[in-house]
Image: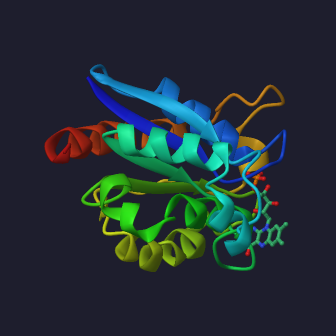
Amino acid sequence: MTTILAIAGSLREKSFNAMLMRAAAELAPAGATVETATIKGIPLYDGDVEAAGIPPEVQALKDRIAAASGVLLVTPEYNNSLPGVFKNAIDWTSRPSADIPRVYGGKAIGVIGATPGPGGTGLSQAAWLPVLRTLGTLPFFGARVQVAGAGKVFDDAGRLVDAAVRGQLEKYMAGFAAFVARHAR
Ligand code: FNR
């Protein structure tokens, strides 16, 4: 069984990216399990806090990332780049740096995202690439999910109701799960 940890990079209760994360979990192919994670509760990075010990919320997220065969970042876009709150969480999971190979080294990783705007989070997804390279991950480039106009793609209950996006996401998850299974460490 291939286990993928999906992390939504928004703190908002009605986050479109959390909706997209849940839809990705539902559309995972047979043989793959998608677990979901939140960045809620992750404190702001502070070297003095780190010196006193990795906070338990950070340790828990790190352990879940380390245990998963693949990681799916579900990212909003802020000011044509990645959101600070999401990067803060991933930065914390890269500490101490001696642990990076265990947590991230060679790990299959995908990035998808949703926005109510027209751009589909393409710039945010691209902005993650230097981070993924620095962490030594293995990014998946076999498909894209860049959800634009998210207000019409999800209904009030947070369900993915757009058939075309649903098809794209299903195809992405099939390709990503196969990639994860091929490269599982
Ligand atoms: C945004 N938003 C946004 N959207 C986009 O497509 N491109 C952008 O550059 C930005 N910039 C931006 C900056 C800041 C500071 C905020 C707060 C928002 C809008 C953003 O996509 C929208 O708030 C989403 O709803 C955020 O994702 P969640 O919370 O719905 O997952």
Q: Left of 2 or right of it: where is 157?
A: right
Residue placed furthest toward the top: 30
Position above or below: 24 against 40 = above
Where is residue 12? Give x, y as percent: 83, 47
Q: Is residue 146 visible?
A: no
Q: Left of 95 or right of it: where is 79?
A: right
Residue placed furthest toward the left: 182
Position above or below: 161 against 15 = above
Give the image quarter of residue 53: bottom right
Front residue of 72/16: it is: 72
Q: Left of 179 or right of it: where is 99?
A: right
> The C terminus lies in which quarter of the figure?
top left
Where is residue 10? Give x, y as percent: 73, 52
Tell me which residue sits at (31%, 54%) in the image: 102
The quadrant of the rendered image in which ligand 1 is seen is: bottom right
Tell me which residue sits at (61%, 55%) in the image: 54
Q: Is residue 91 visible?
A: yes
Give the image quarter of residue 70: top left
Where is residue 104? Give x, y as percent: 36, 58
Front residue of 108/167: it is: 108
